[in-house]
Amino acid sequence: MLTAELQHVNLVKVLGFCIDKDEHILIYEYMLNKSLDYHLFGTIVSARILLDWTKRVQIIEGIIQGLVYLQEYSRLTIIHRDLKLSNVLLDENMKPKILDFGIAKIFVENDHQTERIVGTYGYIPPEYVKRGIYSTKLDVYSFGVLLLQIISGKKVSSLYGSHEDLSLLKHAYESWKDDKGMEFVDPSLDDTQSSCKLMRCLEIALLCVQENQNDRLSMLEISSMLKTGSTNTVISPKKPAFSEQSDEKKMTKSSELISVDDATISEVVAR
C-alpha cells in the first residue's frame, strides 16, 4: 500500500498484488532494459555500449529526482534503505526508476533508531550498521556509492589500487586527493560535450559517503550542485566511511543481517 501511494516518474509503478496462501507477489510495470547493474557489469558488450556519458547523466539525474521526491515532496518522508544498482531499473528510453521498497522506512521526526539492520553490504553507512541510526542521510550515502559505480564502472565488492588493497570508496578518495580522478573514472566516458563533468560527480559522490552523516549533502544540495556544472567546490570531501579494512571487518561481525553479495537481506518476522 505504501509503494502504491508513491507516484513519481522515477519510481517503478506498482500495478497490483496477489496473495495466494504462502505466495505473495507484487506486480510492477514492465521495465524493458532491466537493471543498471546488468548494463554496467553484464557480460553482454552491447549493453555496456548503451551507457555513454549522456545516458549515464540522464540516469544520475533521474535517480536524484526520485530520491528528492521521497525525501522532500512525497506525503511521507521515505528512506529506501536498500538503494543499489540492481534496484534501479531502466525503461525503454533508458530512464531510471527506483525499485523495491520492501524494507523502506517511514521517517518519523522523533524516531531515528532501529534494532533491525537490513540492507546490502557496501551501500549502507556506519551509523546505521553500528548503532541502527537511520535518517535521510542513509540514502544519501547509498547514492554516493551508486554514483561512484556509475562514473567508474567498478564493483563495490572488489579491491583496487596499485596493491589491490583499497575499497572502492577509499580508491576514489585517494585518486581525487592525488589529482588522479580521471584514472578512477571509466576510460570510455567523454564529458567534453556535457555540462555535467565527471570530476564534479566524483566530488559530489565523495561528499555523500563521508563518515559523519552531518557532513553529507542533502539530496536537494546534490541536485543543485550537479546543475551548476562547476568543478570548484567550496567544501572538500573528508575521508570516506569504512576507509580501513578493520572497519569493514567490524561491520560484518556487528550485523548478521547484512548481505555481502549484493543481495538484500530482510528479517523475517512472524505475523
Image (spheres, rainbow, N blue to C red):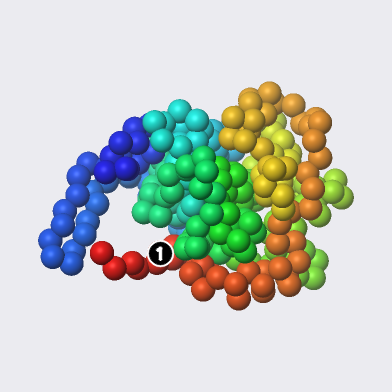
Residue lying at 13% horizontally and 65% vertically, measured from the top left: 21
Residue pictured at 51% horizontal, 40% vertical: 109
Residue furthest front as drawn: 110
Left or right placement of residue 224 versus residue 7 in this view: right
x and y, in percent, of residue 120 in the image = 51, 62
Q: Report whether residue 29 is seen.
A: no
Q: Amino acid at mark 1?
A: Ser
Report which residue position mark 1 lands on: 266
- The N terminus lies in which quarter of the figure? top left
Q: Residue at x 33, y 67 (%)?
A: 269
Residue ranking furthest to the right: 178
In the picture as drawn, the residue positioned furthest to the left comes out as: 20
Q: Quadrant of residue 232?
A: top right
Q: Nearer the viewer, residue 231 or 32?
A: 231
User: How many labels were placed on the picture?
Assistant: 1
Above or below, 262 against 79 in this view is below
Judge whether 63 appears above or below 149 on screen.
above
In the picture, the quarter occupied by the C terminus is bottom left
* Residue 242 placement (x, y as % from top left): 70, 62
Q: Position of residue 141 (x, y in %)?
A: 61, 48
| Mark 1 residue element | loop
- Out of 64 and 36, give the one closest to the viewer: 64
Residue lying at 53% horizontally and 35% vertically, measured from the top left: 64
Question: Is any part of residue 136 visible from this angle?
Answer: yes
